[in-house]
Image (cartoon, rainbow, N blue to C red):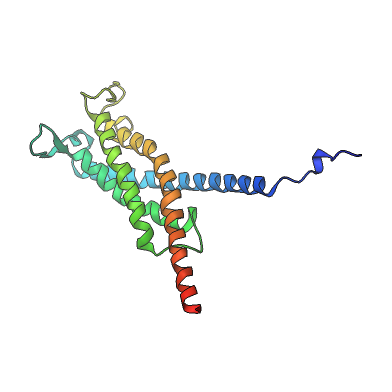
Amino acid sequence: MSTPDPSTAVSPPLALTTGARAVRALRQFVKFGLVGGAGVGVNMAVAVVMNKANGGTANAQDVLFAIPGTDFNVRFTSLVWIVGFLVANLFNFQLNRSWTFRSANRAPWLQEFGPFLLVGSVAAFVGLFLKVALTNPTSPIYLASDWFHEDAGLHSREYWAQLITIVVTMPVNFLVNKLWTFRHVRNRHLARVEEIERTKAA
């Protein structure tokens, strides 16, 4: 009895499906990263514009208002982070919706943007504390090196803290948005559409 030639063996369909899914996920991650990179540019552009409008990054720690009942304050750097996030989030969503996770089964724009904004807001909330920690001299992760100063944009502690925080929060954004915003929400929308079609056909 002859033995099968391993070189001509056909892989099980499941293996092919798993491989195809892995390739697709990798492709989506690369696209998400490219979109995220563009979003970083948008976010940093917002940071530069806002800081310049406020007299430069040397004023990034200006107090906007005190948090009632505490010894803490909300500073201009926090406002920069929030506004930068909101602008970049909208930019990233539109590109991810139309390119990274493009599908014929897309849910309506608002149904997808809501979860995307929610996921981004959670990441931004965590990122806000991270950025504050990177720019607060009393923090254990303060960017304390003499290389960081506000005399030149390239060395700006404010800008580097913004950039580091974006990079740290991006992978979480990708994973949750892939599994929830662009999969679960769309599958739920498709199920509703199919149910309506079945009802009409009955």
Instruction: Examine the rendered structure and indicate whether residue 140 appears above or below residue 86.
Output: above
Describe residue 63's horizontal placement relative to residue 195 as left or right. left
The residue positioned 87% from the left and 38% from the top of the image is: 3
Describe residue 146's horizontal placement relative to residue 95 as left or right. left
Instruction: Examine the rendered structure and indicate whether residue 194 appears above or below residue 74.
Output: below
Q: Position of residue 1 (x, y in %)?
A: 92, 39
Q: Position of residue 83 (x, y in %)?
A: 26, 48
Res. 91 in view: yes
Instruction: Examine the rendered structure and indicate whether residue 8 appears above or below residue 164.
Output: below
Looking at the image, the residue that sits furthest to the front is 202
Res. 52 in view: no
Looking at the image, the residue that sits furthest to the right is 1
Which of 132/161 is in front?
132
The residue positioned 16% from the left and 38% from the top of the image is: 74
The residue positioned 33% from the left and 52% from the top of the image is: 117
Q: Position of residue 37 (x, y in %)?
A: 43, 44
Instruction: Examine the rendered structure and indicate whether residue 17 appears above or below residue 197.
Output: above
Looking at the image, the residue that sits furthest to the left is 69
Q: Position of residue 112 (x, y in %)?
A: 38, 58
Describe residue 6's horizontal placement relative to residue 76 as left or right. right
The residue positioned 66% from the left and 45% from the top of the image is: 15
